[in-house]
Amino acid sequence: MAFVIADITPAQLREACGQDPGSVCRQIFEQTENRTLAEVSDVVFGTPLTIALIVVGAFIANRLVGRLVNRTLRSLSSGIVRERVSAVRRRTPAALLETPAPSLRAEQRMSALTSILRSITGFVVAMFAVFLILSEIGIDIAPLLAGAGVLGVALGFGSQSLVKDFLSGMFILVEDQFGVGDIVDLDGETSGTVEAVSLRTTRLRAVDGTVWHVPNGSIGRVGNKSQHWSRALLDVEISYDSDIDHAKEVIKRVADAVWKRRDDVLEEPEVWGVENLTANAVVIRLVVKTLPSDQYDVSRELRQGLKEEFDREGIEIPFPQQMVWNRNADDRDALPSAPHRPPLESEDGAAPRKRAEHRPARSEGDAAPPERRTKPAPPKSPPAKS
């Protein structure tokens, strides 16, 4: 049975299917010329079918975008890890190859970033699908878009610090500035072990147990003390009377013993030599490369070993000294008095003249100083007759 498409004018099509006729209503009306059937078909099959297609398309788009984000971040993660391992492979090949810390750290970071980006892309795709569905139902989405724009501008001005925190948190995760378990110093004011990193704040635990919550937007400079490897740096002081070469040999011997005894020391310790000359001591610098966050434990063991070995070798560890002079009353009396200086004489040997008193000159217009008047003495009374 063949369908014959009747000649339908645009006015009849608009009257049957509305100003924006759908494909289902158009096809039914052109084939049957039945207005009621076309309207029923459009209501039953047209709009619901379009909404279903929009939902299915949004679901497929969300899955595809999520896979794209996941694959891109995975490739970046593996590339970053290989680049960093190859950059330090010459220094610590065995330690880095046997320790899965960099790979595990990058894996955790990429998992967090993947989850965040997939959530953002999923929200964007869902918003597009909602707007398309509202438009298909017949709701004008232009006012909604305008209102959303105004709301976005208002939120942008009202929450600038919040947006700054989120953007800073994204860059902290992407650039791998620090992670959970790292020992960091933020702007030289707050330091401790990182316990949690979110898009808005970073939580630190200080040595004394204090928990610091730092907004990511306020972090201007980060010092990471435990990323990939650490270094124990000791400035050992000896007295000026000690033999420097002998002291360096003792320091190297103690450091080598710790290196052979511990597995967290990555390389042979190095004695760099005399670092400074202070008022009381000669400073010799010792450096030891360790696993991340192990430099403090290694430094404590080195200090204890150096103290014990210095005592056995007779190397003096200096301390500030001060000389104090005590004088009693007899000592002050025994001190010679200051020599008497004679008055200066003139060139001709005459007695020194008294320095003339300088008085300001008086001009002609100035009034003469008043004459000094003395009170007359009272007359003497005659002596009394006996």
Image (cartoon, helix red, strand yellow):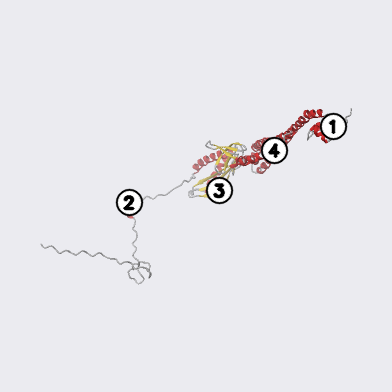
Amino acid on which disc 4 is placed = Pro
- Name the residue beneath numbered marker 4: 143
Instruction: Give the numbered dot on residue 273.
Output: 3
Per the model, the C-alpha gap separating discs 2 and 1 is 131 Å
- Name the residue beneath numbered marker 2: 329
Please indicate whether residue 231 sits to the left or right of residue 28 in the image. left
- Name the residue beneath numbered marker 1: 30
Dot 1 or dot 4, earlier in sequence:
1
Residue 234, x across and y down, in percent = 54, 44
Between marks 2 and 4 in the image, the one whose residue lies nearer the viewer: 4
Per the model, the C-alpha gap separating discs 2 and 4 is 100 Å
Please indicate whether residue 373 sits to the left or right of residue 62 in the image. left
Question: Regarding mark 1 in the picture, which secondary structure is present there?
Answer: helix
Question: Regarding mark 4 in the picture, which secondary structure is present there?
Answer: helix
Given residues 12 and 329, the one toward you in this image is 12
Amino acid on which disc 1 is placed = Glu
Instruction: Tell me the quarter of the image containing the N terminus.
Output: top right
Q: Residue furthest left?
A: 386
Task: Give yes or no for contact between labels 3 and 1 (Cβ–Cβ under 8 Å).
Answer: no
Amino acid on which disc 3 is placed = Gly
Instruction: Give the numbered dot on residue 59.
Output: none
Disc 4: CA contacts within 10 A as few (<14), some (14-19) or many (>=20): few
Question: Regarding mark 2 in the picture, which secondary structure is present there?
Answer: helix
Dot 2 or dot 1, earlier in sequence:
1
Residue occupying image coordinates x 33% and y 55%: 334
Between marks 2 and 1 in the image, the one whose residue lies nearer the viewer: 1
Residue 60, x across and y down, in percent = 74, 33
Question: Regarding mark 3 in the picture, which secondary structure is present there?
Answer: strand
Amino acid on which disc 2 is placed = Ala
